[in-house]
Image (cartoon, helix red, strand yellow):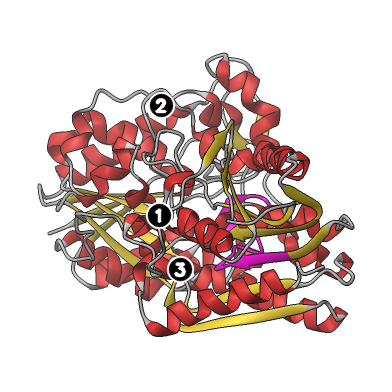
Amino acid sequence: MTAFVLVSGMFTGTHVWEDTAARLTAAGAEAFPVALTGLDGPRGTAAAGTDLETHIADVLAAIDAAGGQGGGDIVLVGHDYGIHPALGAADRRAERIDRIVYLDSAMPRDGVPALAAVPDQSLRERLAGRAGAGGGAGAEEELPPPARDAWERWGSTAGLTDAALDRLTALAAPQPLGTLLQPLRLTGAVAGVPTTGVLCTGNGSSIEMVRMLVGFGGDPALRALVDPRVSFFELPTGHWPMLSCPDDLADVLLRAAAGEGHRLEPADAPAHLRPFLLDLPERPRERTENVDLYLPDADGPRPAVVFVHGGPVPADARPAPRDWPTLTGYAGYAADNGAVGAVVAHRLHDLADYDRAAADVADAVERVRADPRVDADRVALWFFSGGGLITADWLDAPPPWLRCLAATYPVLAPLPNWGMSGTRFHPVRVVAKAGDLPVVVTRVGLEMPEIAAGVEEFLAVAEECGARVEVIDVPHGHHGFETLDPTDESRDAVRRAMSAVLGHLRP
């Protein structure tokens, strides 16, 4: 008999597991929702000093109780913040745990507090200094639970009924700050336990996105996800699947316990490093600081197209984005067509890096415009993937020299689990200020749903406000189609997009 030990996330207690636990027991399994100190019972009942170790002890007690009732398989499920005490406990009972399920959660690391996984960036910044002090400061304080209309700051509420959201709010409890500030300590024993990731696509996670991140390389924790002991499932719902689709969640948990799930295959050549879809002559480049210039065979100042890669990409990813075939391909193609192609390297290594990445881009653009071989009054900016959020700065107040803004399979609205809804990096909200700036969007038909939703929202707002947006469709294209889908349809889309952009750079 399988025993599921269920660990809840921020502000929530055992009540969130009621329906899922009932379905698990109806299927012949056992379910042990863990009562975390301070999060179950009346509000504000956390004892002074409640911290992550307190919750690890709570999970250890549940594991011991589950093992003592039958000696069957134990599957430890951690949702959201709950994966931190779950992993801490599993590290001390590794021989007792048959599988760990990461339920729409981060991947905690030794020495890193749970605060690092909190989606609210402003809160992370405010408490970062206290977390760096080891979690002692503030351990007796609490973080108030969200109001009914503020849960979206902590995760997508997609799929929740009004009644479920009312109950979630009514039973929410303050989160003891010590549980977020105290670093997680792992010995490494838990590394050998099989794992399953359950990704909630409505909250911005998907298997395809994980595959893309793994392909970037540079992060050993991500590379480990191709281990055959690691499996994945997707649920088309928001961040609280135990409330929005308890039947589906129970089914997934039972299948995970049986060893089922999607597995990532190691790739000889990651998709983003495959050849560019156009056969172009090799063209030299000039590298100065964070800008690579691909120069046309022409005299006199020429228009320029500045290419901005996506992300976040790990800082130690090799090759770096400026050397990826897609970026070098587009820049060389621009040069073949008489424009200066400029590839910008920026420091978007984490979701908290958008400010500095945007500053890197702005500084690089000015240096490109200052180059005597560039016509400073005829410049286009072309953004890709996660770099699309940076377009907000340029849409909000387009300078007169910016003749066109292009975005290819862009992220145009922050994903729900990015915690960026309150930042300026939200192109949907500012496209109405773009005025007469021409915008060229390359839209792929096989886009990840969580990204496609933002693109459609952007286009709807653009149409409503009369923005000058041209859409280049690639109906059978994936995110990164230039190396994934070398088809005639894809080649035609690249040619049409380049033609549209260069058309706006004519004198």
Quadrant of the drawing holding the C terminus:
bottom right
Q: Dot 3: within a 10 Å radius of its alpha carbon, few (fewer than 14), some, or many (20 or more) residues?
A: many
Which residue is drawn at the image coordinates 79% and 55% (left, top)?
394
Residue on which the image places disc 3:
479
Nearer to us in this view, 124 or 91: 124
Q: Dot 2: within a 10 Å radius of its alpha carbon, few (fewer than 14), some, or many (20 or more) residues?
A: many
From what the image shows, is residue 247 above or below residue 413? below
Mark 2 lies on a secondary structure that is loop
Marks counted in the figure total: 3
Q: Is residue 50 left or right of residue 86?
A: right
Name which residue type carries label 3: His
Q: Is residue 99 left or right of residue 494?
A: left
Residue 455 in the image, given as x and y percentages of width and height: 63, 73
Compare marks 2 and 1 and give the one earlier in the sequence. 2
From what the image shows, is residue 208 above or below residue 355? below
Q: Dot 1: within a 10 Å radius of its alpha carbon, few (fewer than 14), some, or many (20 or more) residues?
A: few
Instruction: Decide whether the magenta segment is chiefly helix, strand or loop.
Output: loop
Query: In the rendered structure, are the residues bearing label 1 and label 3 in contact, judged by CB atoms less than 8 Å apart?
Result: no
Residue 246 in the image, given as x and y percentages of width and height: 41, 71
Disc number for residue 469: none
Residue on which the image places disc 1:
282
Magenta span: 405-422
Mark-to-mark CA distance, 1 and 3? 25 Å
Compare marks 1 and 3 and give the one earlier in the sequence. 1
Residue 253 in the image, given as x and y percentages of width and height: 28, 63
Residue on which the image places disc 2:
184
Residue 163 visible in the shown view: no
Question: Image quadrant of residue 506?
Answer: bottom right
Mark 3 lies on a secondary structure that is loop
Mark 1 lies on a secondary structure that is loop
Nearer to us in this view, 30 or 348: 348
Question: Image quadrant of residue 469?
Answer: bottom right
